[in-house]
Image: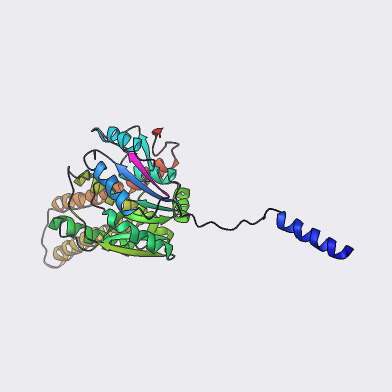
Amino acid sequence: MLFLAKVIRTKNFIQTQPSLYPLKTNTSPLISLVIPVCNEAENLPILVSKLEEVLTAYPNREYLFVDDGSTDASVEVLNELQAGNKNIRILKLTRNFGHQPALYAGLSRANGEAVITMDADLQDPPECLPRFISSWKSGNKVVYGRRKNRQSDGWFKRLSARVYYRLLTKYSTSSIPEHVGDFRLLDRQVVDDLLAMKRKDPFVRGMVAYLGYTHDFVDYERPLRNSGDTKYTFAKMFSLALNGLLSFSTLPLKLGLFLGIISIATGSFFLLYIIYDTLINHEVYPLYKWLVVFLFMFNGLMFILLWILSEYVSRLFRQNQDKPMFVIEKEQ
């Protein structure tokens, strides 16, 4: 009887002790959306309405809008939307730092287990988001939004994009998928690894590809802008392309070597021809004409090489400066 009483007391003690390893709950994961904003006041109410509509199945979510120095009423519109929506967070940068730094700023403040990056102009369709999340839940660390075609772009943009990505894929340290931009889902682990890279000149699509995580694609038709004009001018697109090329490719250095070989070979050919014609046919050439040609050729080559080297040196300079990539004025 004494033994039985001890067993009962021990059983009751075990039952009343709190578990050291509590059971996992079935709460849905936090989904963060990082959305850079630059003068998109007219599109923001429509965007938030569509996000609320397509993400009703994911109650645990946050919309992190990063105002990149808007000069219109974007901030005021965001404040009004935030007053009626607890899911909205606002990051206001002190000035326009550019799309990629704004994206990086949002990633640094996103709390989600999955982080979706998209633009505010409604050309990244919110209807794709449930497919992004479904693919992520099936085990993919990165889910890219991939355009089915580029028919809405002009012929020059289509051609330049095709050539650019072919060159970047062939000569870069990683394979950057074609027809993808910054419309993607990233797992928390990918976001943490991105932030650990601490780039001063971020090229996010190249950085994501460089990490090499398992990925999937969601194909979609890219709609036209709902309102307003594109904020990506030719100069900004060229700057982004150059940033990607210099950050993830050695092609510019190889191009300089190729041009140097061609230039030296051409100069050597003409020099040998002049020597041969002078010795065999007794022709007299005014050498100063050829010297002027050679000087122009080599000066042009030197300028190209100096320009390429200066780009790399400037990157090293910015990377080692203690200068913030972005400055957050206010976080709500």
Q: Is 209 on the left or on the right of 278, as rendered?
A: right
Q: As rendered, which of 257 and 263 lies closer to the eye?
A: 257
In this orientation, does residue 305 appear? no
Q: Is 327 on the left or on the right of 288, as rendered?
A: right
Question: Where residue 20 sits in the image (x, y, percent)?
Answer: 67, 55
Extreme bottom residue here?
280
Q: Which colour scheme is used?
A: rainbow
Q: As rendered, which of 297 and 287 lies closer to the eye?
A: 297
In which quarter of the view is residue 260 placed?
A: bottom left
Q: Does the magenta stretch include residue 63?
A: yes
Q: As rendered, which of 92 and 300 lies closer to the eye?
A: 92
Q: Residue at left 53%, top 56%?
A: 25
Magenta residues (range): 59-70
Q: Does the magenta stretch include residue 266?
A: no
Question: Where residue 174 sits in the image (x, y, percent)?
Answer: 38, 62
Q: Residue at left 44%, top 41%?
A: 320
